[in-house]
Image (cartoon, coloured by chain):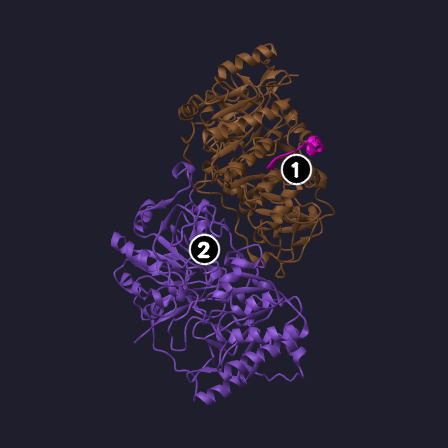
Chain colours: A brown, B purple
Amino acid sequence: MKPELVKNAVGRLVPQIINGQKHVPFQGIGQFRPTGRKAAPLIPTCIDYPADGNKIVADLKTALQKCGLHDGMTISTHHHLRDGDLVSNLLFDTIHEMGVKDLVWFPSASFPCNEPLIPYLEDGTINRIEGSMNGPLGRFVTEGKMRGTAVLRSHGGRVQALQDGEVKLDIAVIAAPCSDAFGNANGQSGPSACGVLGYAKTDYLYADKVIIVTDNLVDFPNLPMEIEGNYVDCVVVVDKIGIPEKIVSGTTKITRSPDRLMIAELTAAFLEQSGILHDGCYMQAGAGGTSLAIGYYTHQILKQRGWKTRLGFGGSTQYMVAMLEDGSMEYILDAQAFDLEAVHSIANNPNHHPYPVFNAYNYHSKGNLTSMMDIMILGATEVDVNFNGNVVTHSDGYLLHGIGGWQNCLFAKCTILPIPSFRDRIPVIVDNVTTLCGPGELIDVVITERGIAINPRRTDLLDKLNGSSLPLVDIRDLQIEVERICGGKPERPNFGEHIVAAVKWVDGTVIDVVREVKV
Amino acid sequence: MKPELVKNAVGRLVPQIINGQKHVPFQGIGQFRPTGRKAAPLIPTCIDYPADGNKIVADLKTALQKCGLHDGMTISTHHHLRDGDLVSNLLFDTIHEMGVKDLVWFPSASFPCNEPLIPYLEDGTINRIEGSMNGPLGRFVTEGKMRGTAVLRSHGGRVQALQDGEVKLDIAVIAAPCSDAFGNANGQSGPSACGVLGYAKTDYLYADKVIIVTDNLVDFPNLPMEIEGNYVDCVVVVDKIGIPEKIVSGTTKITRSPDRLMIAELTAAFLEQSGILHDGCYMQAGAGGTSLAIGYYTHQILKQRGWKTRLGFGGSTQYMVAMLEDGSMEYILDAQAFDLEAVHSIANNPNHHPYPVFNAYNYHSKGNLTSMMDIMILGATEVDVNFNGNVVTHSDGYLLHGIGGWQNCLFAKCTILPIPSFRDRIPVIVDNVTTLCGPGELIDVVITERGIAINPRRTDLLDKLNGSSLPLVDIRDLQIEVERICGGKPERPNFGEHIVAAVKWVDGTVIDVVREVKV
């Protein structure tokens, strides 16, 4: 049966029923107003928990049994351990052994390390993934092989969906680098230390049942309580929750590509000349090679000018830590630490604070951090001539990336995409993005090695930089130039009719879909 | 109309309908099992909040209007500023001016400073107080003058009632010693610094609307976020939220009464000889003069033995801070700072952590702190020969105190009441407590200046201390001795039929009532 599709506010055809549940088509930025009340998990009682606070159970299977695991439930995991995570695979190995079927997996993100879960998608242990898919699982989904339809949400959209009861979470399984027997947990110490647990707060607040899996049991009270033990049902101690060198590689390094370095230099120059970089500003960059270079150049400008940024929001890296340490940045608020320097800093620098995506990104909140940010550096797989952005698929139609915080971050005062104008001889500037993840009205500037394209809606920026030495270009001229270099527009993939994934906007509405690619 | 009463599990006659709402009679400790789901506040959206994060409004009236204040709503305040609080009176002055009526005031506690609110109880601005009443308001209620029926809850019971939706909170008004314009707030700095805001967490999580009132606006981000700005609707800046010398008096001092000092010495000796005080134990004492003396004596024992307590739960005082600082205590977990030394310690000692009653005391939680505590020192206005305790009324029937965390703390491994055997020539040991706040099966030891009465249920303690030098007595012998000194049993008050207050147990059931005293 073909689902009935409606055209949403950005002209994309989207279904109103996904996996049997009703969803609202995107209605425009700031147009959809939620009604009703937040999700309400079951009321627990201390009667059911040990008086001595010791919630350790023998193994994950026992924990899942105690939590009443059964067919059709929704189970969440988190990507705090990134590609070094061992817990999500252990979880589904255990569930598979138990013979439970038809689960919804609700990860904050999945990674290439989760490729071994493909057989469980094939055999019906997992009906579908609702969450980011980086790499092999995305490929599997794109080729139409998953039973259910994937639902992609931003980090903030994931918070919104749980909070609003759009996704009813039965069991949250939280891998924790350190935990006490009561379930107070954080990411600061232990062999699998990852710094912060910035993605699990909504899960423990709204799940009916919460399981902590740790390889580093410490004495009560384990502080800070990033995960509050009062919400935890069971603690499982295992040998190893992660592979340290894949959790924090320590190899996140500034790009050496001359083109990327040029993009970074242009971006820093743009920030300086536009006045967007200023004493006391709030900034967020990211951990890609170009972003790190931008961070580095920005740091030099701050030092020259004697300025400091008031705060940086992490994904934190050694480059942000350097700014914090020499006083060029007053605070790091952090949802995720990308390298060992950042992990160390969180545990030791009193101005480096855990700051979950729950507080930074949720659009169904009484304000959030993103709209206060002055400078927002983001990536994209494609941008179109109307400044619409894509971060999940490539021009070949393949779904290979998660949204991350990207959509949430678009609400910053100035959103900049420093991106190459083409990759592997395929233009990045296109007529229409393959998947529309973010509407052009929220994307202010695209900076490529061939010039800076300012969104015509930002007349203030255009006025300000009129006559500057910056290489300003019209995005349509940029497109023509890039197509000449690449020998034309990207080839259109062979899409089938089958919708393999829905892409949510930050308010829970459906902004686009991903269709099957016929191979 | 007389309410229909039923006898509950401790033999007290209680109503099942209070203020028009259904309530469950006490069913015995650990017998009542909650069903259903937690309270669910309205889903907000960033559309309705300023993108720059500035939620400051002109004044409290504007804030209340924005929050949709209307007749019959439930409004909460907190006693972080204790008898120096200026915000709760300002709040009801404002509401009175606005002409709004019939409100339920849901304070974490009221204090003598709230005596000026009596006219608002008389004129119907406030229908009733659900919360602790210390002093004048309690007197007013006892004499049958409040329109609605008071509902008394422990600190943990207050969390439970909000969390379970038993009390639907419309607007939380939180006085904050420091806040940024987004509403991130804590108690650590400013002219009204009170250390921690340990009582407001449930309120901001579950209220539909949240107002911060501060006299110390600081730059974003105000860290730590004891109150998370994402839950805050408006910030109101006023000249003064509190009278510093009444917030933290700095005069909380060890008793000088020879009888009380003797009780304290006996308690310390009991703790040492019973083995309950041990290296690594968890303890909670409190801030009364006797408790402070117990803390002091305990500290000496720890130092002599070379032991340290793993943690102390505050109400913190200079005596606990001294233990923390010389290594006799590893951590202070703190819901309330009682003096300036404690306020300073919280802001500066990394082992002194805010720890809200939300996490410490809620019985409808997946475990809490109280049942893990080894040593629990509490007070009482009366104890009966079955070890039942009263903390809210005196033998004259007057309701003059709140429950505080008392009921919650009874779940500790050893609950000790070090109390004088009589006060003002009225016996404290009675046949039946005037108001039953805590069942005797949870009270382990009563320590008076005339000896130590161990609850016969604690055969382990009796065995252990058999033959010790401690002055062990039977509680009934103690009663006889005290009655001889005082010239008989306390006079029974002239109670009317009218129920002026219901006393809740930690699980939301009704354990007792307070009746009107005819004057």
Q: Which residue is painted at 59% across and 65% down in the image?
A: B324
Can the viewer see residue A500 in this picture? no
Q: On screen, B105 above or below A486?
A: below
Q: How busy is the neighbourhood of tag 1: few (under 14 within 10 Å), some, or many (20 plus)?
A: many
Q: Nearer the viewer, residue B470 or B272?
A: B272
Badges 1 and 2, same chain: no
Indicate the position of residue B249 as horizontal and vertical percent values: 43, 68
Mark 2 lies on residue? B200
Q: Percent position (x, y) of residue A226?
A: 58, 49
Please, is residue B292 above or below residue A172 in the view? below
Chain label for disc 1: A
Q: Is residue B55 magenta?
A: no
Question: In terms of image quadrants, where is residue B517?
Answer: bottom left
Residue B300: x %, y % from top left? 61, 75
Q: Can residue A109 be found in the magenta stretch?
A: yes
Q: Amino acid at mark 1?
A: Arg
Estimate the spatial distance between the alpha carbons at disc 1 and disc 2, rounded to whole Å: 35 Å
Q: Nearer the viewer, residue B40 or A100?
A: B40
Asked if residue A354 can be seen in this view, the reply is: yes
According to the picture, the residue beneath numbered tag 1 turns out to be A82
Q: Which mark is residue B143?
A: none
Do callouts 1 and 2 mark residues in contact (Cβ within 8 Å)? no
The one of A131 and A366 positioned closer to us in this rendering: A366
Find the magenta span and give its range.
A105-120
Q: Chain of mark 2?
A: B
- Looking at the rendered structure, the secondary structure element under dot 2 is loop
Q: Quadrant of the C terminus of chain A?
A: top right
Look at 49% across and 15% down and name the residue there: A476
User: As drawn, which residue projects farthest toward the right?
Assistant: A239
Q: In percent of the image, x 45 and y 36: which residue is there? A: A371
Instruction: Please state if A320 lies on the left or on the right of B307 as rendered.
Output: left
Q: Position of residue B372 (x, y in %)?
A: 60, 63
